[in-house]
Image: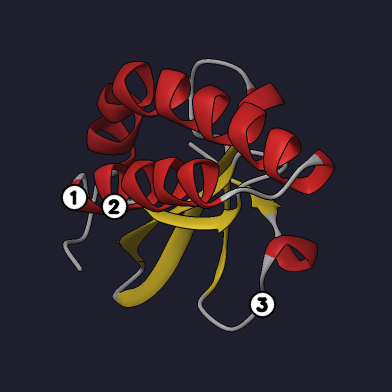
Amino acid sequence: MPTFTRAQADALLPKARPLLEDLQRRVATYRRRPTDPVAREIEALLREVAELGIEVKDPERGLIDFRSKMRGREVYLCWKLDDGDRVAFWHELDAGFAGRKIIED
């Protein structure tokens, strides 16, 4: 996986947001009525997001991570659909969403 600066991650959000919104809708549809075509659509959207170098952590919440480096170590920049137009959080690789911290400029 590539690593991203905060600016690079922010720049990808306009591409990622509609994909994640679509993914969120399709996952909700699949939960109500599982079908193979919807499952294939979900898989295709996950691949499309992954091709951007983004890791989908929770498709229902639109939660994604961007690998990054902070103070010389690898971390994740963390964003979800209702976080706004900028990546504002980060966490250690093994911490997950519960370990999110605000990025201090």
| Label 1 SS | helix
- Depth check, front residue: 98 or 50: 50
Residue visible at 71% across and 61% down in the picture: 97
- Label 3 or label 2, whichever lies nearer to me, is 2
Say which of 56 and 69 sits in front: 56
Mark with earlier residue (3, 2): 2
Residue 51 - label: 1
Q: Earlier in the sequence, mark 3 or mark 1?
A: 1
Residue behind mark 3 = 95
50 horizontally vs 17: left or right: left
Q: How is the image coloured?
A: secondary structure
Task: Please give the label number shown on residue 47.
Answer: 2
State the quadrant of the N terminus. bottom left
User: Is residue 84 shown above or below 92?
Assistant: above
Disc 3 residue type? Ala
Residue type, label 2: Arg
For residue 87, above or below residue 94: above
